[in-house]
Image: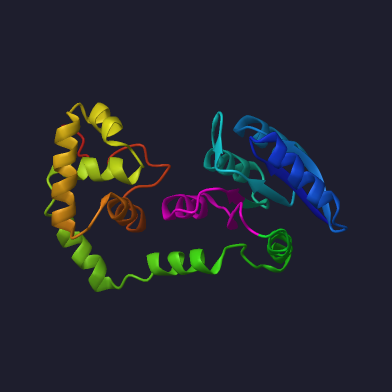
Amino acid sequence: MINILIVDDHVLFREGLSSLFRSQPDFNVLGEAGSVREAIALALHLRPDVILMDFSMPDGTGLDATREILVEHPKAKIVFLTMHEDDERLFAAIRAGAKGFLVKNIPVMQLLESLRGLQVGEAPISRTMTARILEAFSQTDSQKADDASALELLTDREREVLIELGRGGTNREIANRLFISDNTVKNHIHNILEKLGLSNRREVIRYAQQRGLISSSQPTNPWHKPSR
């Protein structure tokens, strides 16, 4: 019997999943949560085997819930079930400790089989997303050296903008955080694209994520040098 907790802020979707799992002889729905706070409280109280986790919630993200839950309940198998399938969220979820990442348009039977596979050590991740993960970790030492050389071309301010881009900041958010204008941010992004040989903003974000320049648990700039 797979004891499961469902975390999603959309009541109708959450109840639909509950109904689906209750119709299966090998699933037992322990509870439902619609927020980060509820998810953490129920996970620690009910100790489910599997937690289906949405990414976006009213009081935070599934990443926030995942980190806190795994500190106290490290055996929980957390699988993200979300509308988002971009690389940034995928890598962030895996780094946070998730065992799988599925999108909400997955067929019902595939969802059920993916979760059953958890019990025998399989990861509920699509082939496409698995390929993205392998690509992200396939850099050779020479590629890493080239990355370091390219990064040395960036000014301190361009590095700060790169960090903020990697965190998913908009131009306006970056401008506010760094106390510069929107136009200055655009100029810095243009320079970053040229110096790193990238084509668009999405590639900049992927570049920062894949090379470990930023992480969701890293609130400060890694290039920052403390004043003496």
Q: Quadrant of the C terminus?
A: top left
The total number of labels drawn is: 0
Where in the figure is residue 104, as x and y percent of width and height? 61, 51
Residue 44 lies in the magenta-colored region: no
Residue 104 lies in the magenta-colored region: yes
Where in the figure is residue 205, as x and y percent of width and height? 32, 50
Write the residue at 15% across / 42% down: 188
Q: Quadrant of the N terminus?
A: bottom right
Q: Quadrant of residue 67?
A: top right
Where in the figure is residue 212, as x and y percent of width and height? 34, 54
Left or right? Give the position of 171 relative to 152: right
Q: Is there any visible trace of residue 47 in the rendered image?
A: no
Where in the figure is residue 170, as x and y percent of width and height? 31, 36
Q: Quadrant of residue 7?
A: top right
Q: Is there any visible trace of residue 201 in the rendered image?
A: yes
In magenta, the rendered stretch is 80-106
Q: Nearer the viewer, residue 77 or 201?
A: 201
Q: Quadrant of residue 44?
A: top right
Q: Residue furthest right?
A: 25
Left or right? Give the position of 148 relative to 123: left
Q: Nearer the viewer, residue 19 or 176?
A: 19
Write the residue at 70% across / 34% down: 11
